[in-house]
Amino acid sequence: MEVRIEDLVKRFDDVIAVNKVNATFESGKLIALLGPSGCGKSTMLNMLSGIMPVTEGKIYFDDRDVTMLSPDKREVGLVFQNYALYPHMSVLENICFPLKIKRVPKAERIEKAKEYARMVHIDDYLDRLPKELSGGQQQRVAIARALVKQPKLLLLDEPLSNLDAKLRVEMREEIRRIQRESGVTTVFVTHDQEEATSISDYIMLMKLGVKQQFAKTRNLYNDPANLFVADFIGNPTINQLHGIYEKGNFRPDAYENAIPIGRYQIEDGSRVVFASRPESVIVEKKNGKTVMEVEETYVSGKDTLCVLKAGDGRLRAYVDNDSAPQEKDLVSVSFRDRGVFVFNEESGERYYE
Amino acid sequence: MNKKTKRYNGGRDPDEKFEASMIGKIALFLGPFMLGIVIFTIYPFINAFLMSFKENFSILRNTFSGWGLANYRKVLNDPIFLSGLKTTIKYVVIVVPISLIISIVIAVLLNNTRRFKAILQTAYFMPLVTSTAAISLVFRFIFANEGGLINKIITTLGQTQINFLGTNRWSEFVLYIFGIWNILPFTIILLLAGLQNIDPQYYTAAKVDGAKTLDIFTNITVPLLSPTIALVAIVNSISAFKVFDYVFQLYNKPGPGYNLYTIIYYIYEKFGGTKPQYGYAAAASIVLFFIIAVFTLLQRVLQKKTNY
């Protein structure tokens, strides 16, 4: 089912939690609502589920306007952050509950619950109470309970935040597998960019209630709409140097030499932020071009992360282990075309070539 | 807990063993309380227990003819005691479940209401802060024969008035209402506390699943409240088994026709009166004690079962 939101607004007294958000979630895809805390992502999810009334705007499921419908009439499945499994019911009873409410005959609902329990790999624990399960197992039960009524939209609120690091990686792959298997349009909320980029098809990045960018996951990294997006996505974070744009050159405040960056549609003398992904920084033996000093090096797997001193600023660059410079070395720095962006310093808007 | 220990220890290692002087301090603080318990609870209990086995016991001369079960034999074969037991059990069986059901409904409604909360809280709190003696006077007025509120309504409606306080059948009825009304506030407070412990997320989850108010009540609220319900049911049963004061305050005797003669009334009469029989009274007390003990055990089992 396709989900379309139009000019969605949520206001709490004087605070605007969600501000005029428009988006279309393609049917059958896994979509992440990403952003720092207080960005309105959970509010968005609650409005999609119908738990929270909408202040302004419309929500459409396919062509049906569901803005004013109560949660049960929207046919959504919701997985809560702390799972909200009914503590007095066994795993099987928990999964059966939505069907019991719909007055599905007992034999039928047990059969169906078992089917979904198998899908989420929890079928060995049907008689256990929630308190007898680990966090990951509770998560699986919560997903099965949300899926058993065959919702048109599955919503997950910070599904992995209550799990330990190792389980988190395992469960996020599980969520992706379950989503693929069931084919249900899924929206999940997270503040962890790695979590969002690793499993979702699309990401909506939000900040202070405003949509920053809604795009395919890959594009968010390769083609950020503004400085906030470029800064939020990617680990280690994108390099940022502040300075002035002049005739195809960037003059950093913190560094004496101009860096040639090519022609952008920017007035000469404008203040800009020059941002570069660590893997887009080319580090070579000192050859007279932009020279910087290597401050620190960190070996991580097959690459070495070099921290370069650009005056008062710092640049991080990934270098192959074999050709990695030593600390205190002087090196020449240049940039690839990919992964290098120029933003308006004040508004954070991106400039294009 | 840990924080407190640290503060009292003034930065010393919290695992450090208590010093001898600490034990003296502890004894000083706990002493008066322990003394009170020993004098007013433990000693009388042991004494009553022993007394119940002393045959032909005279409290003035402190003599008895020997140890034995004669008192128990007498009490358990005493038709007055047995009818008292019957009256008491009937009281428990009627008052406890009805008051519990009313309390659950009121507590759930109170928990869900935003408006009139202050007025409602005062209203249900009233019986708890008013003396039962005063309330019993009000009840006597309400149910009085001539000029009683209810009889006035009845006669206005053209019916013949009912002798609520003077007949066996109706006096029992008034006692039950009085008992239920008195037990409500305490029960409601405990249930409200229980309700506030239920994570509201369960209600949201159930609503998303399409559950209606009644579904939520039967499938979520009542099961999650069951530990509190079990506790309240047992505590109320225990206090209902000891019913005496309500009868006394309403009628100044065990009902108009000695029809509301409860176990405590039996014990009360055997201890006092013109011809006290302490042995019988002690034996009856111990019988009541064991009935209550069974309920207490029941409560422990139920609470373990409903511990999620």
Image (cartoon, rainbow, N blue to C red):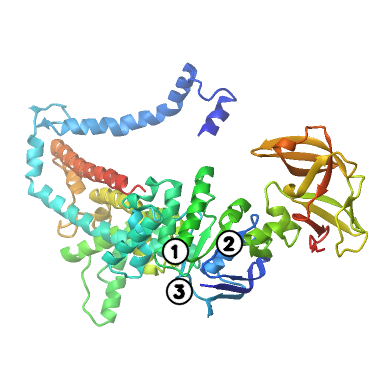
Residue B175: % across, % down:
25, 60
Tell me the chain of label 2. A
The residue identified by callout 2 is: A201
Number of the label disc, if any, that sits on residue A73: 3
Mark 1–mark 2 Cα distance, whole angstroms, equals: 15 Å
The answer to whether B265 appears left or right of A7 in the picture is left
Q: Quadrant of residue B150?
A: bottom left
Residue A183: % across, % down:
47, 65
Is residue B150 among the parts visible in the rendering?
Answer: yes
Which amino acid lies under the numbered mark 1 shown in the image of this protein? Ser
For label 2, the crowd category at 10 Å Cα-Cα, with few meaning under 14, some 14 to 19 and many 20 or more, is some
In the rendered image of this protein, does residue B170 appear above or below residue B299? below
Secondary structure under tag 2 reads: loop
Residue A95: % across, % down:
37, 59
Which residue is at the front of the view, A80 or A176?
A: A176
Secondary structure under tag 1 reads: helix
Number of the label disc, if any, that sits on residue A204: none
Tell me the chain of label 1. A
